[in-house]
Image: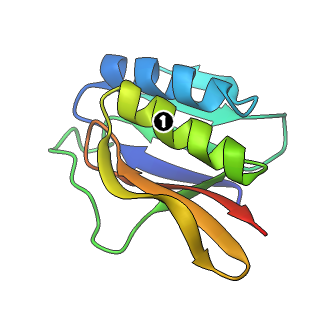
Amino acid sequence: MIGYTTIGSKDLDKAVSFYDELLGLVGGKRLMEMDRIKFYGTDEGGAMLAVCIPADEGMQSCGNGQMVAIPGGSAEGADALYKKAIELGATDAGAPGQRFDFFYGGYVYDLDGNKLCFFNMT
């Protein structure tokens, strides 16, 4: 249902370095790129996460209530993504843990303040 989600960045080089390492933990890699936008995914034709300088070249800002959720494949995988994001400079927004009987997740803000969730449906 989702083709891709785009999040903005103030510093695309820093964002690319962050997402190259972070998404590599779950098999993500850059699938397409142009000067102001990079698309990450696990395979051609699947859902992607795009990181970009805003099209109007204005200031990047984060939407309240917006979040990108990245599956970890297991609780341990969600923990590994959370830990790697923090190592790469992300800010804690909720340590990993069981949130509901069926949902395990951890939350961070990336280098630009975009909220990410690393999760596993249990």
Relative to 111, say whether 73 is above or below.
below
- Tell me how many marks there are: 1
Q: What residue is drawn where x is 67% and y is 73%?
A: 103
Protein image colouring: rainbow
* Quadrant, the N terminus: bottom right
Q: Is residue 35 visible?
A: no
Establish if 65 lies above or below 59. below
Residue 72's spot in the image, x, y percent? 70, 47
Q: Is residue 120 left or right of residue 107?
A: right
Q: Position of residue 25 (x, y in %)?
A: 67, 28
Question: Whole-percent x and y of residue 54?
Answer: 30, 43
Residue at horizontal 70%, vertical 82%?
101
Q: Is residue 96 left or right of residue 121?
A: left
Classify residue 42 as left or right of residue 29: right
In-front residue for pair 114/57: 114
Q: Quadrant of residue 12?
A: top left
Q: Which residue is mark 1?
A: 83
SS for dot 1: helix
Q: Residue at x 32, y 20 (%)?
A: 14
Q: Nearer the viewer, residue 107 or 15?
A: 107
- Callout 1: 10 Å neighbours few (<14), some, many (20+)? some
Q: Residue furthest left?
A: 59
* Kind of residue indicated by mark 1: Lys
Question: Is residue 96 something that shows in the picture?
Answer: yes
In the picture, which quadrant includes the C terminus?
Answer: bottom right
At horizontal 54% and vertical 63% (from top left) the residue drawn is: 97
Relative side of 101 to 86, left or right: right
- Relative to residue 1, is residue 73 depicted above or below? above
